[in-house]
Image (tube, rainbow, N blue to C red):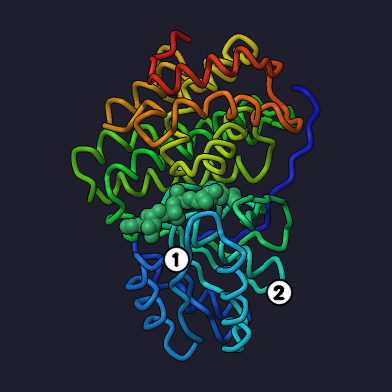
Amino acid sequence: MDSFTYVAQPARVVFGAGALRFLGREIELLGAKRALVLSTPEQADAARQVATLLGERAAGIFPHAVMHVPVETARAARAEANRLGADCAVAIGGGSTTGLGKAIALDSGLPIVAIPTTYAGSEMTPIYGLTEAGVKRTGRDPKVLPRTVIYDPELTLTLPLALTVTSAINAIAHAAEGLYAPDGNPIIALLAEEGIRAGAAALPRLRKDQRDLAARGDALYGAWLCGSVLGAVSMGLHHKLCHTLGGAFNLPHAEVHTVILPHALAYNATDAAEAMRRIARALGAERAAAGVFDLAQRHGAAVALRDIGMPADGLDRAADLALQNQYPNPRPLERDAIRALLQDAFDGKRPAA
Ligand code: NAD
């Protein structure tokens, strides 16, 4: 056994079908009395239901979360929290809503209760992002880590199948890169492999019946584990490429993860052989990169960048951007090889690795 450092993130997790009913108890345990409920405009009904459930412990709702947390939205949410005298925020939704909660916590230290309804995993990380004048800045701060997370699979029954598939592969990407992270450790590897297994195994069942509650529970459990990996160790080329493509070309978050992951794994295959073996085993596939590609394609996800809005003439710029700033990756970053990776992803070519 090699030596390692393992840092546990101090969140309280309440998991299970119907777990939303424990929200009042959880708010009380935090010592809070006035919760501001956050959501996207599309999930405003869910936010209203949460406010109704909280009764007099609800200070109000702010249903204006959008992708990538524009600073203007963050400022408006903070002002609303101040105006209402909120002493905690409840974020019900995916990574965009959790991200808004984090932006409030970053400034105010307000405790966040996250109720995730996708598999993005942000609720398990101290990573925040804020977008100003089109540039997304990310950072880590323990203040933004939600204090309590309620995972209720019933709330994911409405997640459309297409987003179910890409969001689950988004989660798998965190775990896959965690398996070759230089600061990885045996505990994180356990979480990662089990997270990939649970997420991948849930997808065929959800394709048959997207309201299969047991499969929804397995997918959400997988997302929790994968999100814990993201929160604990460094990410490599895959996350860098997705961040770059999402930010510079405004590509949809979960979809871009789904297209890039097989190619990022193929790029790293020979330099991270043990991680690939574990990813393949968790997927029940022969090879890691092709296994992820097949998982996506079998479940109807787009597998080519050109099909999710990437302009062909942006590939050179994307390759240049991917080489900016240093980040850990098993295989050294080589411009020509990264440009070739992006071309394969653009064309939707099945990787051989
Ligand atoms: P999202 O939060 O943007 O949600 C996408 C859409 O799906 C929204 O309209 C949302 O309202 C809707 N939706 C969510 N759950 C639903 C449900 N159960 N039923 C019906 N509709 C539902 O998407 P996402 O992929 O979860 O999050 C992406 C964002 O999160 C990106 O900005 C990304 O950078 C960020 N993120 C951050 C971290 C981190 O650690 N900081 C981790 C992962 C993702």
The picture places residue 210, in percent across and down from the top left corner, at 23, 46
Q: Is residue 274 left or right of residue 260?
A: right
Q: Position of residue 292 (x, y in %)?
A: 41, 24
Q: Nearer the viewer, residue 185 or 65?
A: 65
Q: Residue furthest bottom?
A: 56
How many angstroms separate mark 2 from mark 1 (CA)?
19 Å
Q: Which residue is mark 2?
A: 108
Q: Residue at x 57, y 75 (%)?
A: 77
What secondary structure is found at the residue carrying circle 2?
helix
Which of the 4 image quarters holds residue 232?
top right
Amino acid bearing label 1 = Ile
Nearest the viewer among 6 and 90 is 90
Circle number at residue 92: 1
Q: Amino acid at mark 2?
A: Ser
Query: Which residue is rendered at x = 19% and y = 44% of the image?
Result: 209
One can see residue 222 in this view: no
**Dot 1 crowding, Cα within 10 Å, few <14, some 14–19, many 20+:** many
Q: Is residue 235 above or below residue 280?
A: below
Quadrant the N terminus occupies: top right
The disc, 2 or 1, on the residue closer to the chain's N-terminal end is 1
State the image coordinates of residue 325 (x, y, percent, origin top left): 75, 33
The residue located at (70%, 31%) in the rendering is 185
- Residue 238: assigned label: none
Q: Residue at x 57, y 66 (%)?
A: 101
Q: Is residue 141 left or right of residue 15?
A: right
